[in-house]
Image (cartoon, helix red, strand yellow):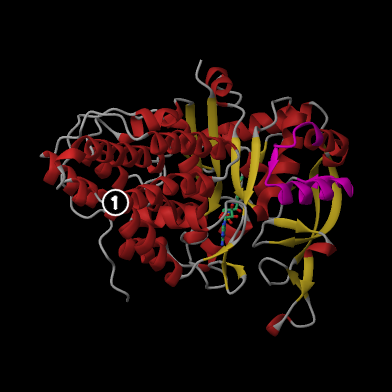
Amino acid sequence: MPARFTVTTPIYYVNDVPHIGHAYNEVATDVLARWHRMRGDDTFMLTGTDEHGQKILRTAVAHETTPQEWTDRLVESAWKPQLELLDIANDDFIRTTDERHKVGVRIFLQRLYDAGWIYHGEFEAEYCVGCEEYKTPGDLVPGTGEYEGQLVCAIHSRPVETVREANYFFKLSQFQQQLLDLYDARPDYVQPEHVRNEVRQFVAQGLTDLSISRSTFDWGIAVPWDETHVVYVWFEALLNYVSAIGYGVDEEQFARRWPATHIVGKDIARFHAVIWPAMQMAAGIEVSDHVFGHGWLLVGGEKMSKAKATGIEPRQITDVFGVDAFRYYFMRAIAFGSDGSFSWEDLDARYHAELANGLGNLASRTIAMVHKYRDGVVPDVAPVPEVAALLATSVERADAAIDRFQIHEAIEQAMRIVDRLNGFVTEQAPWVLAKDDAQQEHLDAVLATLVQGIGTAAILLAPVMTRSTQALWAAVGGEGAVRDQPIREAAAWRGTGRVETIPPLFPRVEAQ
Ligand code: MSP
């Protein structure tokens, strides 16, 4: 039976249009999903939108419309088009306003209630609507500017609001020991290491019960046993991961897809690695496979955000450099798990050095030489052993890096092949060999080596650059779709034995 790989992005708040921070998260998840599909795993990628709660409600009101109309508009005009723009091959898209989600949430909640994990109580707490999260004093920092003298949310730099309500509570505090045991028994459950440490420390300090309903507004899913309350937006949102795959309704689909791996920004790792597993334990379903908390795209040292007007839209970049370069740049330039700063200069430099001069040039030179010296026919001989060995180890290392979510390392392995082949061309100087009758077999081996290596790089880069790798693959004689090639056998691919000339894969971009 093929291995199962169910992978999810967070569901995005649709109070505004997406920026490259969201795109970063979508692309990374998509690369992992594509890689697993090329392994032959039974892969399912889920993404979607988080549409309930106060934040969306207030945005809709501010725009003089209803929240349903607002979210419909944003989903159709901005969020779904972004997935298409970025070549995201998600298998499903869930909206929390979908009927299937409402059904799943109600079933899950009722089960928790019946099992005694939910009680009614009174409380007062500080709440950040931007985060849709209750804050502890430790989460707040002194405000600056117009908020001088007040405490503000460390993420949104705005004051929090005091919530005083009678609500339903989830007995989160009772899961402290089980959670600590989980982190200890499965060290790779939360990754990377610094996020795991942060989460573990947070739990070790002790947990308080969580308010999971609100009664002062109604834009949400009604609590099944008390229609005067709606479910707290985070509690509800986390359930998208199971409501999308048939929880409580389609047991067969659920058994096939669950548990999942969650790729999230580090700012929401706690929800996924503390509250969510406690909910799973309470409901008696398996705990998720992994929670990976990636870093932030920073602007001026701070998390890029629309609220702070630092959001860059993906199209601003793809219009200039193309979608493949967009995907490549963010996956390659930032170690997955660390923060990274976007800069036009860095993007431009990498585009030209690594893609145009590195990969693009290697391809065009090789194809031109096979045409010139061998009439477009790839010599049917084995690649030179030194390069053949490099291809095999690069494939193995890249594949192993993916299991550690180290996408940048996988790309680095592919680019090591490209660099080595470019060096190989310079060393071997095929144009000199071509003039020497005694060197014809040697020239055959050089050309065959180059073509083999390019095909291998095309396969390894296919999850990252969906378009140019297909063109490259076809150009070196690859048959069918490059995305259908078994990625673990990337070093041993066989093609038609003919090359085709193609237009430059990465045309030079003039500085703007
Ligand atoms: N709706 C919640 C998630 C619920 S999941 C059950 C949410 N939405 S969000 O739209 O605010 O954020 C979605 C994702 O985008 C998060 O993983 C967040 O970390 C990520 N990013 C938002 N800005 C980002 C950057 N500047 N850089 C990297 N990722 C960023 O939270």
- Looking at the image, residue 173 lies above or below residue 254: below
Magenta region, residue range: 184-211
Is residue 209 highlighted in magenta? yes
Q: Nearer the viewer, residue 378 or 76?
A: 378
Q: Nearer the viewer, residue 217 or 357?
A: 357
Q: Nearer the viewer, residue 313 or 208?
A: 313
Taking the image in four quarters, ligand 1 sits in the one at bottom right
Image quadrant occupied by the C terminus? bottom left
Residue type of the residue flagged with mark 1: Leu
Q: Nearer the viewer, residue 457 or 406?
A: 457
Q: How many numbered discs, if any?
A: 1
Q: Residue at x 25, y 61 (%)?
A: 507
- Residue 241, quarter of picture: top right
What residue sits right under mark 1 in the picture? 362
Q: Residue at x 88, y 36 (%)?
A: 177
Residue 269 visible in the displayed image: yes
Assign a secondary structure to mark 1.
Answer: helix
- Looking at the image, residue 146 lies above or below residue 502: below
Q: Residue at x 60, y 32 (%)?
A: 260
- Residue 426, quarter of picture: bottom left
